[in-house]
């Protein structure tokens, strides 16, 4: 078995990955809260923005920041570009599916919550292992079945909890606390999956036999920096947008104005009818 290191730069990678995960989850929960105050297409757009925040920043970026601290003594690890990009698309897609299942269903529907959480969790676990499969190195990989199953269970529980938070919580304090817990769950799933990984020498070329890849510094770092810029843009959008409570108050005000306008128009309509 080849000796690997998950913390080659000490606490830098796990701490930074955790903070980024918390930020992505926090933004996603804020977007979900605003989605609950909207209807139709507006709700769908806020849910999609939440899926990008949680799936891309909260999960995918967390995974690959942590992977930057993963090294094998005397070997260079590269990443297959299409597979790595596909893993990001999967992360966003499964979060979107879970959010739409719960977000467009009746409040308090536990069957939808469990269905959406299971889909989200399995998808997140699939994204994690696809991201690891994207590694190219002259070795081969295998997984400990027990830890592999545990990582999937953690992902499903975390996914269900995330959807419950997205469909229930209001207020900055509750959302902030939930994002800290979600960050722990995402990081826990990642490092449980990494603990399940075993690397062995492969005389036939190992993962390199499946095609070439790009180095982390030439591919992952620029991609992560680009996503960080997108995250700051999402932060700006969420900051400038009205809160969920303000949206509900505006909707209630418009409804009262419409009702008042209708009541004022009725006498005029009766007078016109009488003249006719």
Image (tube, rainbow, N blue to C red):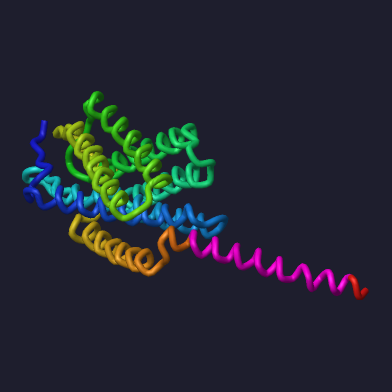
**Which residue does the image show at 38% across and 55% down from the upper left?**
52
Residue 150 against residue 20 in the figure, above or below: above
Q: Does 260 lie within the magenta span?
A: yes
Total marks placed: 0
Residue 142 against residue 82 in the figure, above or below: above
Residue 27 appears in which quarter of the rendering? Answer: bottom left
Closer to the camera, 186 or 222?
A: 186
The percent position of residue 179, horizontal first and vertical second, equals 28, 49
The majority secondary structure of the magenta stretch comes to helix
Residue 189 against residue 220 in the figure, above or below: above
Is there any visible trace of residue 213 in the rendered image? Answer: no
Closer to the camera, 230 or 171?
A: 171
Which contiguous range is marked in magenta? 248-273
The percent position of residue 32, horizontal first and vertical second, equals 42, 52
The percent position of residue 154, horizontal first and vertical second, equals 29, 33
**Which residue does the image show at 37% across and 69% down from the upper left?**
240
Residue 70 against residue 234 in the figure, above or below: above
């Amino acid at each position: 078995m080849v000796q690997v290191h998950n913390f080659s730069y000490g606490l830098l990678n796990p701490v930074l990955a955790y903070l980024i995960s918390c930020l992505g989850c926090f933004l996603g929960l804020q977007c979900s809260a605003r989605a609950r105050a909207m209807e139709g297409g507006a709700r769908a757009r806020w849910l999609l923005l939440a899926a990008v925040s949680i799936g891309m920043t909260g999960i995918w970026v967390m995974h690959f920041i942590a992977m930057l601290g993963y090294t094998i003594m005397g070997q260079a690890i590269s990443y297959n570009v299409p597979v790595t990009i596909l893993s990001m698309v999967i992360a966003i897609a499964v979060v979107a599916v879970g959010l739409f299942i719960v977000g467009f269903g009746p409040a308090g529907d536990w069957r939808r919550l469990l269905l959406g959480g299971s889909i989200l969790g399995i998808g997140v676990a699939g994204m994690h292992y696809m991201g690891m499969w994207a590694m190219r190195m002259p070795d081969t990989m295998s997984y400990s079945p027990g830890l592999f199953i545990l990582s999937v269970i953690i992902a499903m529980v975390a996914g269900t909890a995330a959807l419950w938070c997205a469909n229930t919580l209001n207020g900055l304090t509750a959302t902030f606390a939930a994002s800290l817990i979600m960050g722990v769950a995402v990081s826990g799933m990642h490092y449980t999956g990494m603990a399940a990984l075993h690397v062995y020498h492969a005389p036939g070329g190992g993962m390199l036999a499946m095609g070439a890849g790009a180095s982390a510094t030439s591919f992952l770092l620029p991609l992560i920096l680009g996503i960080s810029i997108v995250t700051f843009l999402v932060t700006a959008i969420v900051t400038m947008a009205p809160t969920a409570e303000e949206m509900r108050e505006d909707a209630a005000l418009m409804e009262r104005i419409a009702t008042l306008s209708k009541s004022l128009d009725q006498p005029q309509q009766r007078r016109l009818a009488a003249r006719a």
